[in-house]
Image: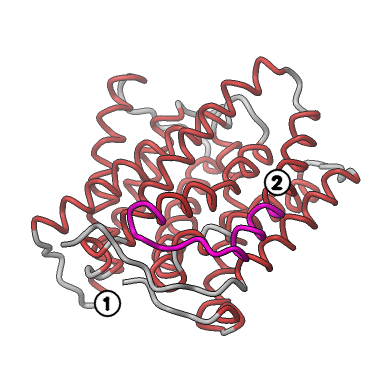
Amino acid sequence: MIGHNPPHALLRPRLAIPFMLVALIWGSTWLVIKGQLDLAPASWSVAWRFLVATIGMGILVIAQKRDFRMTAGGHVAAMIIGITQFFFNFNFVYRAEMYLTSGLVAVVFSLLMLPNSIFARIFLGQPITPRFLLGTIIGLAGIVLLMAHEAHMAASLDHVLPGVLFAMLGLLSASTANVMQAAPIAAKRPLVVLLFWAMLWGTVADLVVAWVTAGPPVFPSSWEYWAGIFYLAIIGSVVTFPLYFFLIREIGAGRAAYNGVIVPIVAMLLSTLFEGYAWSFLALLGAFLALFGMVVALRAKQVPPKSKFQS
């Protein structure tokens, strides 16, 4: 069940630390993903990432002395989350990065608070308050400016359109998983156990589709590739997803997704350091509006939700 925290709740370390940690880590993953695309088919990179992540999540379940067993309803929830988050979402993301800069894909994903808020309103009965709506509009204006800057920097519109389509499909898949895990049928399950089974279901789908679409398993000889796989699997998945899903349960899917507003800014800062990314006035204004909108929206009062999903 989603917690009822006051507007200033994110100032508390219990929520502020995971919120910022997830943003910083996920802001770094876009560069790592981009660097893997030339070394192996995207489908196999996704499959290897979540095979390692599933093992890591299983170790975390054991370390926390949790019971792996779940009810049939729990497995249904885990399967939906696994297929939407760890299969569809990431396969779409990796393909989007074949067409777009990592910064632009990150910017598209910062729109996550929009479908999250809408789906949470429809399926979880979580109201959208006027202040949250105002903050979202301001934040979206900033994201549009960031997107316009990135699109202007792209080499060809022919690459932008299919890339944005893949990114939007990934966005909707991730939002479905976000809202599903906050529903009572999933929320009553321990996070690490739910995530283990979700990752397992997603990994099975990843492996099958990778073999069908990209042929037999591909094992790149580059140590950098495998270092990236382990970083994405352990730091970018096993560490972050329990923290992010915890935030969704505590502050709601819409507010938790504002984490994604920080992610592209982190990605662009890292790109400045490692790829020579040049900030324009448009990008700076977009970043300011996105962050200001996030502050306004996150200070909006939470109203107790009325979920339509029951266990």
Q: x, y (%) of residue 229?
A: 46, 46
Q: Check residue 126 for magenta coloring.
A: yes
Dominant secondary structure of the residues highlighted in magenta in the image: helix
How many numbered discs, if any? 2
Q: x, y (%) of residue 32?
A: 58, 44
Q: Residue at coordinates 48% horizontally, 60% vertically from top-left?
A: 235
- 76 over 173 or under it: above or below: below
Q: Amino acid at mark 1?
A: Gln
Q: Amino acid at mark 2?
A: Ile
Q: Check residue 134 for magenta coloring.
A: yes
Nearer the observer, 258 or 262: 258
The residue most toward the front is 130
Look at the numbered disc 1 and give the secondary structure of its residue. Answer: loop
Q: x, y (%) of residue 118?
A: 46, 50
Look at the numbered disc 2 and give the secondary structure of its residue. Answer: helix
What is the span of residues highlighted in magenta in the rendered image? 121-139
Q: Residue at coordinates 34% horizontally, 19% vertically from top-left?
A: 213
Viewed as shown, does residue 34 lie left or right of 220?
right
Quarter of the image where the C terminus is located: bottom left
Task: Classify mark 1: residues with Cα within 10 Å, few (<14), some (14-19) or many (20+).
Answer: few
Q: x, y (%) of residue 20?
A: 60, 69
Quarter of the image where the N terminus is located: bottom left
Nearer the observer, 84 or 298: 298
Viewed as shown, does residue 195 lie left or right of 252?
left
User: What is the CA distance from the residue labelled 1 to the residue labelled 2?
Assistant: 39 Å
Nearer the observer, 84 or 56: 84
Circle 1 residue = 64
- 240 over 176 or under it: above or below: below
Q: Residue at coordinates 45% horizontally, 72% vertically from top-left?
A: 303
Residue 303 marker: none
Circle 2 residue = 143
Task: Classify mark 2: residues with Cα within 10 Å, few (<14), some (14-19) or many (20+).
Answer: many
